[in-house]
Amino acid sequence: MLRTLEQLVKPYYRYRGYYPARIHGQDFRLDPYHTRFWRRAARGLWEPELFTLLRRHLQPDRVFCDIGAWIGPSTIYAARLCKRVICFEPDPVAYRYLSWNIELNRLTNVSPFCLALAPRMGIETLASFGGELGDSMSSLLKIDEATETATALTLEWTRFIELANPGRIDLIKLDIEGGEFDLLPTMADYLATELPVLYLSTHAPFLESSMRRSRLQALADLLAFYPHCYDQHFKPASMEDLASEDSAEHFRTFLLSP
């Protein structure tokens, strides 16, 4: 019965051109090709802590940077709360839906970029740990078994700041499927100077097991200038937690705050 209902619902919303949903108190028009995901988000079953963070930290005069925006759940939600959103999504399939969701909601304060922030400017191969582009697990890390790939333009963070001159960024969400280990060292000077709130997802299980602890420890040392560290439930944590065995074996999220 549920399967039949799903088969009927999808064509209806695709014909209509959007899927309506209320997500954490905000009404949206959403792309009709991810109805199952949007229903989960509307029921509060997808990363509820992230939406809590956005409500707590964003105000009408603030700027949010979404690095790894996927199809835009955090981007479009944040755009309703703050002055400006800058977002990056190099996966061409995900970016198509990201742009669509921005357009459906007439969000004029969002600047989306179809590129990957990386240690150097160039062209890199992008693939997904989930197997299909657009599935939210796309990464610049080498994936030996990948059968579906795309090319991605990469740009350094410092070069982007020079070109875009975005002004003060108050909150950065960084969720890039393992790319954080190479990207964050190139952002360290900026982060230490500007001290934006950083919502960091770590993906150590995507690395070779022998290097996980050392790469996590390097991140912990690099970000030690942040005086406050919390876990994804906003409970006090530490840089030792970021570099722990648990972080090496699981996907973790940390909130670093000045």
Image (cartoon, rainbow, N blue to C red):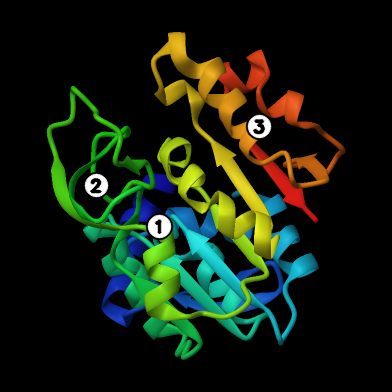
Amino acid at circle 3:
Asp
Residue shown at the point (86%, 39%) measured from the top left: 235
Mark 3, secondary structure of its residue: helix
Of callouts 2 and 1, the N-terminal one: 1
104 versus 215 height, above or below = below
Kind of residue indicated by mark 2 = Leu
Look at 83% across and 45% down and name the residue there.
228
- Disc 3 designates what residue? 221
Q: Residue at x 44, y 47 (%)?
A: 2
Q: Are marks 2 and 3 in contact (CB under 8 Å)?
A: no
Q: CA distance from mark 2 to mark 3?
A: 33 Å
Density class for disc 3 (Cα within 10 Å; few <14, some 14-19, many ≥20) is some
Q: Image quarter for residue 155?
A: bottom left
> Which dot marks residue 133?
2
Q: For residue 70, which numbered disc appears in the image?
A: 1
Question: Is any part of residue 91 visible from this angle?
Answer: yes
The answer to which of marks 2 and 3 sits earlier in the sequence is 2
| Quarter of the figure with the C terminus | bottom right
Measured along the vertical axis of the image, is residue 205 above or below residue 125? above
